[in-house]
Amino acid sequence: MKKILISLLAIFLTGCSSNLIQKQDSLKIGVIAPLSGPASGFGEEVSAILNFAHTNLGENAKNIELIFEDGKCNGSDAVTAFNKLVDIDSVDVIIGGVCSPESIAIAPLADQNQILALSATSGSSQLEGLSEYLYSFVYGNELTVNGISQEIKDFEKVALITELSDINVDIQKGLIKTDGDKIVVSKEFSSEEKDFRNLISTVLKDDIQALILNPKAGTGANNLLKQLSEFKDELKGIQLISHVPYLSDDSRKESLEISEGMIIVATPNVLDSDVEFIKTGSQMEFKALNNFMVGTTFDAFTNVVEAAKKAEFDKYKIKDAFLELNLQGVIVGGKDFNGQNMMNDYFAGIYIVKDGKAQGV
């Protein structure tokens, strides 16, 4: 009788074990994005794209869940969001952060938890080599630095105005390293500053031929350009050069006169037609994300889902499956990380403002 009971128990446990290890066929995707605060526009647009990508799967969407948490574009809130998504919601993979401070903060947590985190929009060069589990579909700051360096090669005296944030200071250091002999004046401002008139006046005292504006996107960048308009007479003959913060036509709408002819070194030139299906499906008027980042956000979802399927929905194998993928998508299709954390297989897009519109050249 005892032998029979042991045999039955063994059969029962074997059955339980097989149920426990049977392949999971569902996927929980945690999203860390700024859903409130000054950068909430980015979060809203990213959310709209991911929700569209999710519903675009049709019948297959039933087994995939998107769970959003507010990273507020800063490290501490991103850490809180990550811990909730992993410890409470038990997500299998992370899309995010959206802002670089979010991604930098969660990188060590991704390693500790062995969970893939894929950013579609974080571009800080600090991400390179920071984690074995966090990857970005965006290029490093070197692309911006090299692009600007090319645009100032024919100038002898250049000024540089930089906002004190991680990405912008990286760009500043890169430009001084590559073109320090040309940059005769370099000034900084904090993100809390609202009046730039003294700074602008100081910079324009030098006999410069070009002025590089290096703020982060947002209110500060808009105010800097608006107040620069008050010095339009002093700016005659000076070439304005910048990058992503002024790629949106809305960012220059209050400074049309001085921004005409501005050179913008930014994301690769992605045509409206390339991402029109995403914009239409998302039912969102995009003001924060440019075409490139609209595409990379859609691609992030696409490739995360493909990696999960390749890993047979084992969360601890998704990272390796992702790195083995033949990447697909609007922007990253056919590209490769080549052992890096950031996707650097891009060429900078060069835009010139003409009739108030940034036009690719």
Image: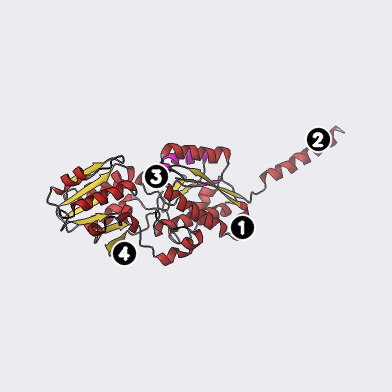
State the mark number for residue 325: none
Residue placed under numbered mark 3 in the picture: 38
| Mark 1 or mark 3, earlier in chain | 3
Category of crowding for the residue at label 2, using alpha-carbon neighbours closer than 10 angstroms: few (below 14), some (14–19), many (at least 20): few
Category of crowding for the residue at label 1, using alpha-carbon neighbours closer than 10 angstroms: few (below 14), some (14–19), many (at least 20): few
| Mark 4 or mark 2, earlier in chain | 2
Is residue 346 shown in magenta?
no
Residue 329 seen in this snapshot? no
Tell me how far mark 4 sits from mark 2, CA to CA. 77 Å
Q: Position of residue 334 (x, y in %)?
A: 45, 61
Residue placed under numbered mark 2 in the picture: 6
**Residue drawn at (39%, 45%), measured in percent from left and top?**
38
Tell me how far mark 1 sits from mark 3, CA to CA. 35 Å
Contact? badges 1 and 3 (CB < 8 Å)? no
User: Looking at the picture, which amino acid does disc 4 mark?
Assistant: Gln
State the mark number for residue 359: 4
User: Looking at the picture, which amino acid does disc 2 mark?
Assistant: Ile
Q: Position of residue 144 (x, y in %)?
A: 30, 53
**Residue drawn at (51%, 54%), measured in percent from left and top?**
50
Q: Position of residue 304 (x, y in %)?
A: 52, 53
Name the front one of labels 2 and 1: 1
Contact? badges 2 and 3 (CB < 8 Å)? no
Residue placed under numbered mark 1 in the picture: 60
Query: Compared to 257, does 2 lie above or below?
Result: above
User: Secondary structure of the magenta portion, mostly?
Assistant: helix
